[in-house]
Amino acid sequence: MDVRTLRTFVEVVRRGGFAAVAREHNLDPSAVSRAVTGLEDELGLRLFHRTTRRLVPTEAGAVYFERVEPLVEELERARLKATDVGETPKGTLRIAAPVSFSQLNLVPLLPELAERYPELFFDLVLTDAALELLEERIDVALRLGPLPASGLVAHELVPMITRVCASPAYLERYGHPGAPSELASHNCLLLNMPGFTNRCGFGTETIDRPR
């Protein structure tokens, strides 16, 4: 069974149609459709319910996808691992990262990295939103805050420390809070990012952050 056909099947299920897969690989949608039809003929199974508007996996197709997807991903990782041995990194690396963090910590590193690997190109997607990595074709993502349960492979780069700050002008006008609980009556700017809540912890004391 051709690995490329299996990869095509997996991508069609993820993207919900032939056209999206065809656009990504610069193919005619009919070529993608024929590849899936050939797979169905080889398996003797109907993998999709086809209508003019939707393409939905059959029960057999959903079961097959569940078993095949991790195998295809493992084969891709093996290919990349073998390609990396003894070769200079090349191609386009698509990176998603928070805006401010990237401007301060990531962007300044790129010129040196580009000089070291002249065949490697960078496609930066700077956003504070938690993108769907597969749908957005992201190779590497930098995230701030706790990582929700997922199948992503993650490594902590640096610990995060949050602080509550105020300008001298603000304190002069509104006064110094004497305890964390008094922050509830102050005007605060909130960090509106995934993984952060409206509650702050100060030692054993936890308070609601003012809105």
Image: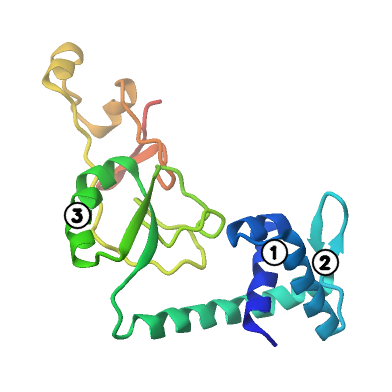
Of helix, strand and loop, which one carries label 2?
strand
Q: Locate residue 169 relative to residue 197 in the image: left or right.
A: left
Q: Quadrant of residue 28?
A: bottom right
Q: Is residue 127 left or right of residue 157?
A: right
Residue 111 disc label = 3
Which mark is in front, 3 or 2?
3
Q: Is residue 41 above or below residue 161?
A: below
Mark 3 vs mark 1, foreground winner is 3
Front in this rendered view, residue 88 or 146: 88
Three-letter amino acid code of the residue under disc 1: Val
| Image quadrant in which the N terminus is located | bottom right
Residue bearing mark 2: 48
Of 46 and 3, which appears nearest the observer?
3
Compare residues 86 and 158 and report the one nearer the observer. 86
Helix, strand or loop at disc 1? helix
Asked if one can make out residue 17 in the rendered structure from this viewpoint, the answer is: no
Q: Whole-percent x and y of residue 10?
A: 66, 70
Q: Residue 44 — which label?
A: none
Look at label 2 and name its amino acid: Phe
Name the residue beneath numbered marker 1. Answer: 12
The reply to whether callout 2 and callout 1 are in contact (CB within 8 Å) is: yes
Q: Would residue 104 be seen by someone viewing this image from the given angle?
A: yes
How far is mark 2 from mark 1, CA to CA? 10 Å
Q: Residues within 10 Å of mark 2 (few under 14, many from 20)?
A: many
- Determine contact: label 3, label 2, CB under 8 Å: no
Q: Earlier in the sequence, mark 3 or mark 1?
A: 1
- Mark 3: amino acid: Pro
Nearest to N terminus: mark 3 or mark 2? 2
